[in-house]
Amino acid sequence: MLRAIICAIIFLVAPIIHISAQKMNVESFRPDDKDITANTAPTLRMDKNGEKCALIKIQTTERQFMFDVGSLGIEYMEEQNASHPAEIWLYVPHGVKTITIQHPVLGVINDYDLGRSVKKGKTYVMKLTSDQVSTLVVDYDNEQFLNVAITPPYATFIINGMKQQLSPKGTCEIPLSFGTHTYRVTAKDYHPAESQVIINDKNNKQFLKIDLKQAFGYLTVEARPEFNGADVFIDGERAGTLPMKDFPVASGNHKVRIHKQLYADYTRDIAVTDSAWVSITPAFSANYAEAELTVPADKGAQIFVDGALLGTGSWKGRLEAGHHKAEVRKDSHRTAVAEFDVEKDRKLTLTLERPQPIYGTLKVVTAPPGATVIVDGREAGLTPLTDDRLLIGQHSVEVVKKGHRNEKSSVIISENRTSDLSFSLTDICTASIIPSPSYANIFINDEWMNRNTSGALKLDKVAGEYKIKVTARGYTPWSRTMRLDGNTKDINVTLHRDYVRRNELYINAGFNLLCCQGVSFGVGGYYHKFNLEGNFLLGLSKSETIYWTDQNADTYPYGVSYKPMGGMVKLGYGFRIGNRIRLTPQVGCQIVSLSEKEEEYSGYGYSPVSSPMAVSATFGARLSVSLSPSLALSASPQYAVGVIKSDGYKALADLSSKIKGYSDGFGCNICLNLYF
């Protein structure tokens, strides 16, 4: 109860208690190696880089101090409180070497040298003394929040020596102990504000609104539209261009100058007061003359006046009155310079000197000699070449010789110096391969070559032996190994239609002659010259009539004739003869069965022979002649040898030589073939 009464008395009399102070001093500063406050939780603090702060314990009973340690900044300040009533705890980043101490009564200690760089996580003790100091009792057991709102929002706000971070709206909320606190607010182009705030209401937050007073006014310059773009200078510094409206200018007296080409400068003194507007309307007077500048016989020369490019070859226009410097420039030429004066309203006609060319020398040699030298696209002569009239600067050089690869390089020509280039030309073949058909594929050393739409392939090969192959579907491949060099002429390759292909399928239909007459149908194919073919035979001829009687019955003889029917499978190996003919020796197997037909019916049935059949081995050849890539005629003569015969077939063969010939003897199959 007594403590509360004492605090109440203190807050009633605190605003009117002022006892003067004469001076303060730093009595001592030392590290305290036994104090681990800065290195143990919960009293340690981290800086913005995540490292431990150093702690400076400032021993004093006074408040309202402000501290500054330079660009490193103060991380946190903790005023005297119940846990350390006679110390201010100042947390700073490691590396701090000096400290500035300010007090509204005791004065200032500027850049006090600590004698060392403070280290992270270390505790230091500083003792402050003064001759006479006012004493203000603070209640450390009570605190309240102070809400601050500042205009402009980018201002700097310092309270009790600590800089506070403001929000983008210029606000912050700070917990403060009961007592009197000193603050200072500064902002660029604003008058600073400095005062104190008393915290003494335990139940309600306190509010502090600070509106800094502007330390500037506004300048507006109004001019006709044709003067837009004129440069505005304030006190010799460029501030912008016309039009200019409400441009902020610091309070005070200023000199305004407005510069517009071809016009005399407009100048005026103005006085600007806080938050006030100043408006001026400049009047410009013409200050130019009509001018014509020409460079005789050199349309490529560039004309510069006072460093600005005006034109090429010639120029007409207005120049500001006064002294000017003209330059005529051209790459690889010596600049021509002229100085002249322009009088207001007096036309000027001036002929400028041409820039003079600057030459160097280029020497080019080739092995073998006699190559054409092309410099920057212009033919310069044959090697060995010496050109002593080449403009200085960088040039492209190309050497060309028939039967050799073109070579390119770049060279820098310097004044009165000789630049040498040497080329060893490679012997190459520049001929073309022109195939027919044009879509044929071209291979060089088994590598497929891309070519232009016309089908021709332009060779660009170093002289030597190359394997050239040209192929196209449906054509006979063309292949050669030849030497290509600079003397090789264009190679025309005409492919011949390939009527006989290594791999193909076919179907055929034809007529079988000789021993077994009839129509045949077949299918076959070639794969890497190997041939496999199958045929079906339907006989058209019939045998002689054979008469049969029944010995167990009293009957008349009856006649029966026989027709062959069968098939064969052949295996062969084909040989090309020219571009259209193929001969294929073949071996195979033939099966023949007989069907019977009663010629003279007696009412007693057919012959007693059952299932007449024969199996023969065949030996022959297939000769085909192509009429087109997909159509051919073939003849397949063969000799058949019966190897297996049924009893019925043997009986019939004994009675009929024609039937015997179905399985034994010569035959020939004539067919029309369709190839795929």
Image (cartoon, rainbow, N blue to C red):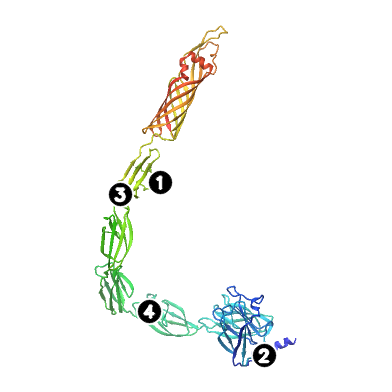
Depth-wise, is mark 3 or mark 4 nearer the camera? 3
Horizontal and vertical percent position of residue 373:
28, 58
**In the visual, does 659 lie left or right of 401?**
right
**Label 1: which secondary element:** strand
Q: Is residue 619 above or below residue 228?
A: above
Residue 133: image tag:
none
Quickly name the residue at label 4: 259
Determine the image quadrant of residue 24. bottom right
- Label whose residue precedes the other's in the sequence (1 or 3): 1
Quickly name the residue at label 3: 486
Q: CA distance from mark 1 to mark 3?
A: 22 Å
Depth-wise, is mark 4 or mark 1 nearer the camera? 1
Horizontal and vertical percent position of residue 429:
32, 49
Quickly name the residue at label 2: 13
Q: Label 2 neighbourhood size at 10 Å, few (<14), some (14-19), many (20+)? A: few
| Amino acid of disc 4 | His
**Label 2: which secondary element:** helix
Q: Label 4 neighbourhood size at 10 Å, few (<14), some (14-19), many (20+)? A: some
- Front one among 138 and 211: 138
| Amino acid of disc 2 | Val
Q: CA distance from mark 4 to mark 2?
A: 64 Å
Quickly name the residue at label 1: 447
- The number of numbered badges drawn on the structure is 4
